[in-house]
Amino acid sequence: MRPFKKTYGYFITLPDRFYPFSCKVGGRWVRGRRSYEQAAARAFKMYGLGRLGYKLTLYRELFHFAGSVILIMSAAMISKTFFGSETALYVLLWTAIAALSFQEFYVHPKKYGQHVRKGVIDWFTWVVPIALYVFLLGGGTM
């Protein structure tokens, strides 16, 4: 279970590590994770624990959206390469939606103290592109 937690932790902190905006920490201008942590600390102080404010939320949601697109492309490639079936694609995507729902509404509130509103925003950012793919580009057949 340890490698899973380590991998999960790596992916969940990707936006932190790639934070492009600089911030002054200890008299030095920094970017990346240290800058993100400083910006998050300021947001928590201003808005309360677990609330990132509009700028950081928008930044993180862009990563969620990109993750959703990568997930769709990966599922399409896996279903075609390993299963050779369009049905497998839909099974993979619906399984991903179930896993994302579990993550956003159970794991994140319990482990990270994430507010329900943030979970709903994250869930929509992940699920809307998947649903659009399934129903519009995928032809809506199941």
Image: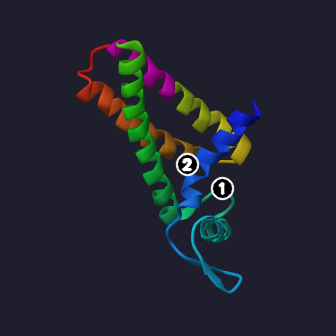
Give the x, y percent position of residue 41. 67, 68
Label 2 secondary element: helix
Does residue 61 show up?
yes
User: Label 1 near label 2: C-beta < 8 Å?
Assistant: yes
Does residue 89 show up?
no
- Give the tally of numbered discs: 2
The residue drawn where x is 59% and y is 45% is 11
Q: Nearer the viewer, residue 22 or 43?
A: 22
Q: Which quadrant would residue 28 be assigned to in this image?
A: bottom right
Q: CA distance from mark 2 to mark 1?
A: 9 Å
The three-letter code of the residue at mark 2 reads Lys
Q: Is residue 105 magenta?
A: no
Label 1 secondary element: loop
The three-letter code of the residue at mark 1 reads Gly
Q: Main secondary structure of the magenta part?
A: helix
Up-down relation of residue 17 to residue 63 (above or below): below
What's drawn in magenta, residue-wise?
85-97
The residue drawn where x is 53% and y is 61% is 18
Q: Quadrant of the N terminus?
A: top right
Q: Is residue 122 left or right of residue 76?
A: right
Residue assigned mark 2 = 118
Q: Nearer the viewer, residue 139 or 7?
A: 7
Residue assigned mark 1 = 50
Can you name the residue that lies furthest to the bottom here? 27
Give the x, y percent position of residue 26. 71, 82
Up-down relation of residue 21 to residue 87 (above or below): below
Give the x, y percent position of residue 126. 45, 39
Q: Which quadrant would residue 105 be assigned to in this image?
A: top right
Q: Is residue 9 left or right of residue 59?
A: right
